[in-house]
């Protein structure tokens, strides 16, 4: 953990330094930035660090919170730490990324239109120089976090009189990133504005300069902004309320307006400084001002007591009130004020927008709606929030009018200072101001490359940590999912036990469907040419059909949403009538459909591609489909689970059970069968996934029940994404007659020794004093079962021994394929049916 010596006022890339060292480093700032930008900041790295800091700030007993509390400005409410925690949490930051930059990984070069080999991404501008105000504790660190979200290097100036709160907060954030990438991108300097040379050195190499403050502050910084550098002004703004006649006669509206005025003592940019009435009559203005003064007088004093105006502010308040009182003699104004000077309402018959001296000082002015744009547009650079009160139709009409006049934000009266997650600030999204939209055009060689970055580098993901989770633990965690994250409910097919419930937020679901879409492109799906029949099972909260409907929607592919059904003839007719050439579905269903309607579909001859999921086609089955139906491509549509979503995908160079990992979503460990330790490279073990791109649930180190091994080396497709080979499920390994037998071994022996090309199911039962293992095969593919039985005994020594020692009876039955047991919801074949008692 980084230490924070308070004697040094500056934080530079992970270390606290003094003035002399800061001056030396400032001189070489351009070279520093160039070195850092050579390696991109992974968004997940930043999100993980921010979420960890958020958790620390929420915990009252956490030492990080205690350290930061010691650096809060005098009089600052410690509750500000909780506010920071909310902003820094994964939920808020991922929502901000999605709203402002379109995804939670905006820096990855993806295809916005899957039918074109054009890649776009949001890239950092480079170096963002932030000049923070001295009167807002959270503005400085959050401005830097926004710069980091866009991937930039950030250098921040805080005021010479500030505490080290910002430096310590950002140091704590950097310390929670084990990669060091966050620390590399953060520099915080504390110095007065009079030190112009430092300000010049900060801004000279900058690609964007963000300055917070009034016109004088912006002008002082703008003088140092080089040509071509983006100046991002977060300056002072004026907000006002606008009331229709119905509203200003409503006491509730006046109470809400008074709450807006008194909250934060008008110190926020969104605080109302003027109240406009939809009238031209002076008497309406004066009458309302008197009524509103009474409401304001009834409001309690600030708690805790507001900071008293400084001498300059006090002078402005006094002067503004005095001038307004003098103009009463001209019939232009009328002033209502507290005897102790704690508030004042100034009615003015002139509609021009006038800034308030704040501290509960409010102008009341007439402005008929027909003159709104003419009156307000000259001040459009300064307009921010408009609080509207009126009928529903008034609100709709007036919203459009004030936005046309230059306002950037409309709220109800009483909610002018409220906001929502991801809200634009002063009419723009901050992350877009700190980013560039970049594009790469590629040729046809990249047709199956969904993300260009996969060809350049591997995704860096946090190391997995914590205990292993099984299905029961994940189901228990579902009970604790926040309601806001439980927006979509799925149930698993139940092929290996009781169907399990899986919960998703729509954001997480969308992220996963985009990932599955990228995987499908890599597998050779062509959204511009393929005509797809979605033949997955639907209903009963089973997710396959819905998910691949969503995937095709995101790809823009032609889709026939038929779903799997028992009427094979009707399905085949629909395929022919609508010229389907690509099938999505479960292998067992597709196998049944193609063979049940073999004559029709062979005569059609139009099926070119099959993308399957949930099960596997054997090599012999693939060969049979290619020879019988002329199918050119047979690949996995995805490898995934209901609760984790897409886990792996096949590329055009993959075959069998080999998949690439969706490394932008998950990490993968392969652990031994008999111990919680990694297996040697290439050895078979349990697949353990850690999801690191999930807002709603923490699914770390989930043992999903599948077996596999890592595949070494870089794939011939060029992708750096890790590869693994699926080798069945733990449930396919059966303990029978004291031996461990594997379903996949039976399938392999049937193919290689007996040339069998159909489906195969094992039934375990008890017969007399012994156990019985019955291998069920399709009669159409194996009318004579003796060659199969001989192949099993000859090729499986453990099975042969169990039979010879009379511990086990082995039978092979040829049955109608439709009679094999399947999962009702998904149509999956039950590979092992255990009916032993």
Image (tube, rainbow, N blue to C red):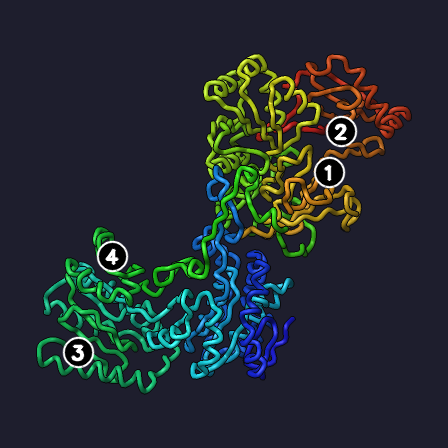
* Mark closest to the chain's N terminus, 4 or 2: 4
Q: Total number of numbered labels?
A: 4
Q: Residues within 10 Å of mark 4 (few under 14, many from 20)?
A: some
What is the CA distance from the residue labelled 2 to the residue labelled 3? 92 Å
Of tags 2 and 3, the one toward the viewer is: 3
For this rendering, which residue is in front, 837 or 825? 825
Of tags 3 and 4, the one toward the viewer is: 4
Write the residue at 61% across / 75% down: 15
Q: Quadrant of residue 254?
A: bottom left
Identify the image quadrant of the C terminus: top right
Write the residue at 19% across / 78% down: 336
* Mark closest to the chain's N terminus, 3 or 4: 3
Q: Quadrant of residue 632?
A: top right
Q: Above or below — where is 763 with respect to 505?
A: above
Q: Secondary structure at mark 3?
A: strand
Q: Going by the image, does 1 lie left or right of 366?
A: right
What is the CA distance from the residue labelled 3 to the residue labelled 4? 32 Å
Question: Pointer 2: what residue?
Answer: 836
Identify the image quadrant of the N terminus: bottom right
Question: Pointer 4: what residue?
Answer: 404
Of tags 1 and 4, the one toward the viewer is: 4
Q: Secondary structure at mark 2?
A: loop
Indicate the position of residue 659 as horizontal and vertical percent values: 66, 39
* Mark closest to the chain's N terminus, 2 or 3: 3
Question: Pointer 3: what residue?
Answer: 335
């Amino acid at each position: 953990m980084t230490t924070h010596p308070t004697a040094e006022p500056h934080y530079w890339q992970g270390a606290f330094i003094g003035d002399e060292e800061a001056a030396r480093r400032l001189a070489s700032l351009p070279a520093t930035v160039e070195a850092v930008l050579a390696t991109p900041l992974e968004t997940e790295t930043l999100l993980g660090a921010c979420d960890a800091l958020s958790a620390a700030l929420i915990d009252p007993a956490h030492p990080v919170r205690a350290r930061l509390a010691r650096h809060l400005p005098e009089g600052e409410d410690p509750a500000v730490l909780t506010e920071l925690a909310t902003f820094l949490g994964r939920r808020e930051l991922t929502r901000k990324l999605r709203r402002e930059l379109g995804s939670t990984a905006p820096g990855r070069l993806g295809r916005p239109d899957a039918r074109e080999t054009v890649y776009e991404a949001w890239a950092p501008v480079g170096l963002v120089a932030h000049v923070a105000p001295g009167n807002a504790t959270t503005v400085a660190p959050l401005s830097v976090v926004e710069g980091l979200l866009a991937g930039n290097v950030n250098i921040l100036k805080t005021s010479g009189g500030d505490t080290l709160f910002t430096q310590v907060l950002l140091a704590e954030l950097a310390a929670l990133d084990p990669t060091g990438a966050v620390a590399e991108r953060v520099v915080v300097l504390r110095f007065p504005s009079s030190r112009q040379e430092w300000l010049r050195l900060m801004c000279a190499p900058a690609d964007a300069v963000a300055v917070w403050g009034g016109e004088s502050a912006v002008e002082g910084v703008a003088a140092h902004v080089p040509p071509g550098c983006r100046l991002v002004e977060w300056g002072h703004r004026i907000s006002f309320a606008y009331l229709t006649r119905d509203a200003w006669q409503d006491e509730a509206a006046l109470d809400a307006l008074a709450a807006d005025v008194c909250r934060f003592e008008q110190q926020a940019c969104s605080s109302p400084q003027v109240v406009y009435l939809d009238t031209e009559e002076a008497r309406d203005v004066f009458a309302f001002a008197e009524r509103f003064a009474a409401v304001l007088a009834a409001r309690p004093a600030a708690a805790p007591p507001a900071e008293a105006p400084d001498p300059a502010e006090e002078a402005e308040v006094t002067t503004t009130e005095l001038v307004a009182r003098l103009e009463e003699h001209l019939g232009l104004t009328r002033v209502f004020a507290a005897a102790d000077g704690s508030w004042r309402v100034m009615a003015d018959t002139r509609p021009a927008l006038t800034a308030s001296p704040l501290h509960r000082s409010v102008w009341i002015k007439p402005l008929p709606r027909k003159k709104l744009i003419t009156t307000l547009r000259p001040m459009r650079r300064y307009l921010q929030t408009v609080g509207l009160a009126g009928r529903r139709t008034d609100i709709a009409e007036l919203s459009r009018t004030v936005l046309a006049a230059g306002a950037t934000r409309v709220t109800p009266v009483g909610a002018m200072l409220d906001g929502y997650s991801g809200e634009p600030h002063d009419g723009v999204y901050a992350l877009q101001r700190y980013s560039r939209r970049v594009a790469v055009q590629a040729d046809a060689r990249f047709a199956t490359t969904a993300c260009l970055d996969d060809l350049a580098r591997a995704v860096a993901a946090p190391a997995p940590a914590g205990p292993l989770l099984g299905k029961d633990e994940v189901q228990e965690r579902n009970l604790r999912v926040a309601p806001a994250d439980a927006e979509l409910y799925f149930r698993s097919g139940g092929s290996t036990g009781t169907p399990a419930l899986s919960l998703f937020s729509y954001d997480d679901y969308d992220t996963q469907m985009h990932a599955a879409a990228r995987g499908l492109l890599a597998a050779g799906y062509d959204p511009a040419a393929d005509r797809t029949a979605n033949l997955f099972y639907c209903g009963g909260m089973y997710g396959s059909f819905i998910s691949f409907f969503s995937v095709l929607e995101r790809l823009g592919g032609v889709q026939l949403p038929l779903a799997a059904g028992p009427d094979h003839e009707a399905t085949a007719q629909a395929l022919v009538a609508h010229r389907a050439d690509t099938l999505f579905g479960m292998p067992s269903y597709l196998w049944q459909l193609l063979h049940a309607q073999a004559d029709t579909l062979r005569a059609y001859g139009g099926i070119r591609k099959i993308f399957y999921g949930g099960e596997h086609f054997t090599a012999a089955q693939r060969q049979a489909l290619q020879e019988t139906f002329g199918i050119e491509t047979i690949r996995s549509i995805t490898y995934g689970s209901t609760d984790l979503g897409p886990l792996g995908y096949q590329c055009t160079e993959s075959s069998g059970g080999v998949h690439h990992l969706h490394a932008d979503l998950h990490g993968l460990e392969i652990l031994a069968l008999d111990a919680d330790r990694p297996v040697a490279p290439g050895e078979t073990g349990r697949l353990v996934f850690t999801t690191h791109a999930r807002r709603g649930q923490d699914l770390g180190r989930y043992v999903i029940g599948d077996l596999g091994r890592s595949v070494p080396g870089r794939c011939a497709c060029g992708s750096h994404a890790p590869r693994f080979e699926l080798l069945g499920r733990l449930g396919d390994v059966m303990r029978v007659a004291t031996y461990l037998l594997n379903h996949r071994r039976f399938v392999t022996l049937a193919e290689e020794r007996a040339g069998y090309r159909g489906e195969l199911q094992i039934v375990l039962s008890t017969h007399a004093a012994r156990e019985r293992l019955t291998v069920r095969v399709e009669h159409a593919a194996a009318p004579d079962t003796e060659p199969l039985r001989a192949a099993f005994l000859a090729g499986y020594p453990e099975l042969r021994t169990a039979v010879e020692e009379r511990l086990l009876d082995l039978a092979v039955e040829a049955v109608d394929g439709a009679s094999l047991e399947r999962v009702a919801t998904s149509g999956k074949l039950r590979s092992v049916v255990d009916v032993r008692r």
